[in-house]
Image (spheres, rainbow, N blue to C red):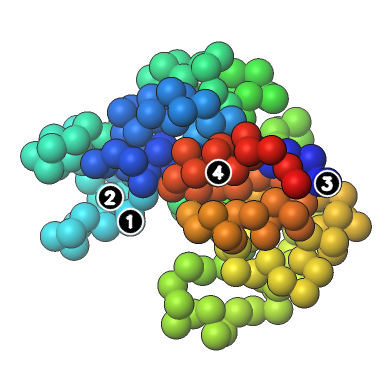
Amino acid sequence: MPPRPLVIAHRGARGLVPFENTLHAFERAVELGADMVEFDVRQTADGGLAIFHDAHLPDGRAVADLTLTDLQAWGRAQGFDIPELAPTIEALAGRIRLDVEIKEVGYEGAVLRALVERLPYDAFVVKSFHDASVLQLKTLDPRVCAGLLLGDDDPPHLLRRRLGELFPRARLRACRADFASPYYKLIRLGYTQRMRLLGLPVYTWTVNDPVEMQRLIRLGVAALITDRPDLALGLLQAPRA
């Protein structure tokens, strides 16, 4: 049987809490015993590093055009606190490993500084959908474990997958990625075998169905990124046939 994959709680235990990307969501992941917690980082207009997923607020304002104070004030008005990167790292250090997604190109250095000042290299990974961002991470610090995100979970776009997502060898090499992080529906047609030949582990996202989890475990993925870490952990703790 393949080795046990890591269980990575997507935006904290997203499927089990009212608000994702919050300290409460991250604490829930720790309580469940997830191996890692995943979250998104965006930079605000004043250089703040906020843990937040969307590029725009529901009213249309861009997160990049807001100050950190204004963004956090908006969050409190919705009933939740938007964390900053550095205090979040400090709160989770030594308790769970981190999977940090950089949402845009341009602030890789600031994210890296926040991480390496507080954590050993084996306590975190960093990833992005942007090839240039992954390459910048590796250029700034070759010791960092950086991954390239691939695919799209919006069904209309699944019919227009690029060959560079199904067969990403050239992209992964060009950006010096240490792992591939594909959308789980891309994992067909010998995907994990191709990545194994490249010496790259596969961190797949975002899989919440137990049947799909079992399929991916059999295929030998290195990590399951999921909104339901409780389900993934339950499958992995069950006796193998």
Residue 55: give its label: 1
Label 3 to label 2, Cα distance in Å? Answer: 45 Å
Label 4 to label 2, Cα distance in Å? Answer: 33 Å
Residue 1: give its label: 3
Marked residue nearer the N-terminal end (4 or 2): 2
Asked if residue 13 lies left or right of residue 181, the reply is left
Asked if residue 216 lies left or right of residue 133, the reply is right
Could you say which is closer to the camera, residue 64 or residue 28? 28
Labelled pair 4, 2 in contact (Cβ < 8 Å):
no
Residue at the left extreme, as displayed:
77
Q: Could you tell me the amino acid type at mark 4?
A: Ala
Label 2 to label 1, Cα distance in Å? Answer: 6 Å
Labelled pair 2, 1 in contact (Cβ < 8 Å):
yes
Marked residue nearer the N-terminal end (1 or 3): 3
Image depth: mark 1 or mark 4 in front: 4
Label 1: state its secondary structure: loop
Q: Residue at x 60, y 69 (%)?
A: 185
Asked if residue 101 lies left or right of residue 11, the reply is right
Asked if residue 43 lies left or right of residue 226, the reply is left
